[in-house]
Image (cartoon, grey):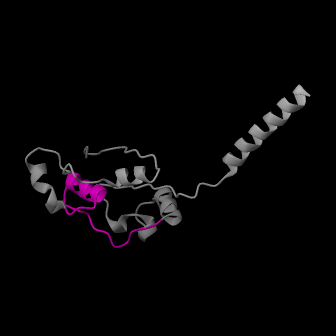
Amino acid sequence: VAAAVWLAAAACCLLGVAAAAAAPNSAPNVVILMGDDLGYGELGAFGARAIATPRLDALAAQGARFTRAYAGYTVCAPSRTALMTGRHSGSFLKANLSGTDIAPGEAVTLAEVLEGAGYATAVYGKSAPLK
């Protein structure tokens, strides 16, 4: 009897693990790629043919493509800050020129919003610390 109870308990645990593993995650992945000096027409996904960009083209084909977006500023740090905070670069550019944090302390970043929705966030590559 003890072996049957143990076997039933183990089967329930394994079925629970299998069900959890099989449950689809309804939240989509969010990947933002930002390249300095990369123009709209330089990727195959947007019609360019001079340079092959098959991996980026595949990502674009499977995701959302923003075709009416503009850089937040002419240099990288304010432009990245505008993207991550949703604020116009004029609201924080003076701080950047004085050498202080470029994002105001009260600015909420896209990463913070995503974390609040249960996402794990990370940044890779060239980045100016926002907080």
Position of 5 relative to 117 (above/below): above
State the quadrant of the C terminus.
Answer: top left
Which image quarter is the N terminus in?
A: top right
Judged left or right of residue 126, residue 22 is: right
Q: Main secondary structure of the magenta part?
A: loop
Residue sitting nearer the eye, 4 or 33: 4
| 49 and 128: which is toward the camera | 128
Q: Give the magenta part as a residue range.
A: 64-88
Write down the quadrant of residue 26 in the picture: bottom right
Q: Is residue 74 magenta?
A: yes
Q: Position of residue 25 (x, y in %)?
A: 59, 54
Check the image and name the residue furthest to the front.
1
How far across and how far down the image is residue 104, in percent? 18, 51
Instruction: Indicate left or right for 53 with 22 as reference.
Output: left
Task: Say whether residue 131 is visible.
Answer: yes
Q: Which residue sits furthest bottom?
A: 68
Where residue 17 sits in the image (x, y, percent)? 70, 41
- Magenta stretch containing residue 59, yes or no? no
Rendered position, 26 above or below 4: below
Kindly give the residue lying farthest to the right in the view shown. Answer: 1
The residue at 28%/45% (across/down) is 127
| Horizontal side of residue 122 vs 98, given as left or right | right
Residue farthest to the top?
Answer: 2
Image x and y of residue 56, in percent: 46, 58
The residue at 20%/51% (across/down) is 103
Point 27% across, 57% down: residue: 85
Nearer to the camera, 42 or 60:
60
Question: Eyeballing the image, is 13 above or below 109?
Answer: above
Please give the name of the residue rendered at 44% of the width and 65% of the height, measured from the top-left corner. Answer: 44
Any part of residue 37 in sight: no
